[in-house]
Every structure is written in C-alpha cells, then in structure tokens.
Amino acid sequence: MEIKLGLSLPRDARTIAVARHICRETLRELGVEGECVSDIEVALTEACTNVLDHSGPGEEYDVELMLREADCVIRVVDRGSGFDVDAPLVMSDDGAESGRGIAMMRALVDRVRFESRPEEGTIVHLEKALEYTEGAPAVAIGHGGKVADAGG
C-alpha cells in the first residue's frame, strides 16, 4: 500500500500550519507513534519555513507526502533561485544564525537530501522510518512499519 498527498500552496506563512496539520492528522489517523509524528511535523515546518525565507521569487510551493510500507517521504519543492547546501552557517547582522533549520531537519529525520538548481528551485527530501502504536490502523491493513515499544 502507498498513500500520496500533494499540496500546492501560496508562499504565505499561514500555509505552513496547513501543511503541518494535514501531515500530522494523516499520520495520527494511521496510528503513527506520537514522537515520530512530532519529529516529522517539525522537520516539515523547517523545510517549509526555508522555502518562505530563502527561495526568492515565486508564488507557490509544493508539499508532497508519501507513505510507503514502513517509511514517510516528504518533498518540499520551490521554484526559487536554489542555494548551496554545503555552505557554512552564517551569522546575520542581528546575531541570528542561518542554517539551523537544515541541522534540525537532519537531527529529526533519518535522511535529508537536497536537489538545488540555480534559477530552477530546490527540492528538500525528508525520509523517516515510521513507528506505529499498538493496534494502529496502518498495521492492521498491512501497511507495515515497526510497532513502538510501549515501555519507552
């Protein structure tokens, strides 16, 4: 079984909450364990925030959620100017550090990959193995995944 959801959203900060909500509720409905849902939700938020903050001109961005067997794959696609993912962290004039979102995404999911093409945009790929609660609907219908240990 494979579940795919696709959103095409305007570049507006309010759309991040929409993407988060749809992703969170889909995962919860399937019985994905709470901490796993939270990790995916925060990583998605960081990816969407980067689109709004750094992608340059463009009116829309896309969020694609794919649940396959035991993992979740999210792609956040913008049509901006692209960026150098290997560039070091940079301090701005106000003391804020640029690049923390990428580090956070890497800490929360199993795999983060970027495809960036100058003047064509960037695709952020997020992948995380799913853990399910006992009796999860996804496990019952044969979706696969690991059932979380109830002991902790």
Image: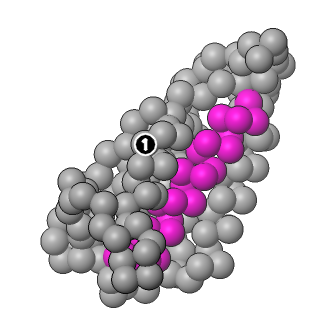
Task: Residue type at mark 1: give it.
Answer: Arg
- Compared to residue 81, the image places residue 129 above or below, namely above
What range of the chain is rendered magenta? 33-55
- Between 51 and 89, the one lying in front of the other is 89
Q: Secondary structure at mark 1?
A: helix
The quadrant in which the C terminus is found is top right
**Viewed as shown, does residue 61 lie left or right of 24?**
left
How packed mark 1 is, by other alpha carbons closer than 10 Å (few <14, some 14-19, many 20 or more), is: some
Identify the residue position indicated by label 1 in the image. Answer: 106
Please state the horizontal and vertical placement of residue 72, each as a whole percent of the image.
53, 37
Query: Which residue sits at x=48%, y=40%?
Result: 107
Please state the horizontal and vertical placement of residue 101, each as a whole percent of the image.
45, 58
Query: Which residue sits at x=38%, y=43%?
Result: 112
Quarter-wise, where is residue 12 in the image? bottom right
Residue sitting at the far left: 118
Q: Is residue 141 visible?
A: no
Quick check: is 41 in the magenta stretch?
yes
Q: Is residue 17 visible?
A: yes
Q: Main secondary structure of the magenta part?
A: helix
**Viewed as shown, does residue 44 lie left or right of 20?**
left
